[in-house]
Amino acid sequence: AQTVTQSQPEMSVQEAETVTLSCTYDTSESDYYLFWYKQPPSRQMILVIRQEAYKQQNATENRFSVNFQKAAKSFSLKISDSQLGDAAMYFCAYRDNDMRFGAGTRLTVKP
Amino acid sequence: GAGVSQSPSNKVTEKGKDVELRCDPISGHTALYWYRQRLGQGLEFLIYFQGNSAPDKSGLPSDRFSAERTGESVSTLTIQRTQQEDSAVYLCASSLVLTGVEQYFGPGTRLTVT
């Protein structure tokens, strides 16, 4: 079974600084998708970024980018120029036929 | 609708009562998913629907849990004889097709069993 591991239960970053959230996964598949979701206190899960495993180029969405290392099964999220509104729980997710989520990382942004 | 909606937003029930949680997916999305999120934890997959069919029910925590979907639209998650351990946020998501694309989530239903 696929597992997703987020080794950082909590992270903190100063406003305007950069932070990287870690995620590793386990799979025997070669074709799959990876996602980062953000969950603010409102509970709404918001898609931040996605990566197709067959693409070597790292996905980027404005201030959010990933470092996808397929051989290492690593999928980290980098948030640049952190803003107060980035404070939330961040979940890494893996998908082929099923969708599996990590336990989450709580990000605090300090003004 | 514009997004996935769920009702009720919050539900408080007494132990032993039955509850029904509703999910309205994005129009045209054929796949629908239910998750459970206990306080401070990640998402636990419960069940998915492709159309009105749920091929795999093994993710449901116990036989007190059931789900159905009609008209390839609304889905209902029913919990019978609720227990305190059922207290959690229940999230619904939908996607255009079953595999390979992101899921769009509803705001969840917070269930509290007293």
Image: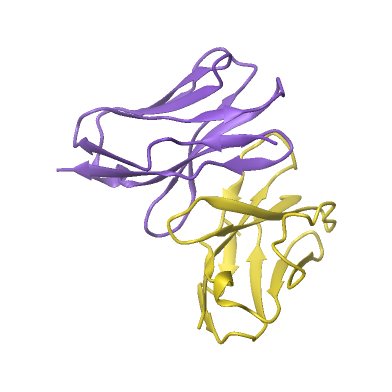
Chain colours: A purple, B yellow
In-image side of A67 versus A17 (left or right): right
Image location of residue B111, percent across then percent down: 53, 73
Image point 40% across, 60% down: which residue? A42
- Quarter of the picture containing the C terminus of chain A is top left
Q: How many marks?
A: 0
Residue situated furthest left in the rendering: A111
Image point 78% across, 66% down: which residue? B68
Q: Quadrant of residue B79?
A: bottom right
Residue A108 appearing in the image: yes
- Quarter of the picture containing the N terminus of chain A is top right
Decide which of A13, B15 is in the foreground and name it: B15
Image location of residue B66, percent across then percent down: 76, 68
In-image side of B71 versus A22 (left or right): right
Decide which of B84, B69 is in the foreground and name it: B84
Image point 38% across, 52% down: which residue? A40
Image location of residue B41, percent across then percent down: 47, 53
Image point 67% across, 83% down: which residue? B18
Q: Compared to B54, does A75 lie above or below?
A: above
Q: Compared to B27, does B96 lie above or below?
A: above
Residue B28 appearing in the image: no
Image location of residue A72, percent across then percent down: 54, 16
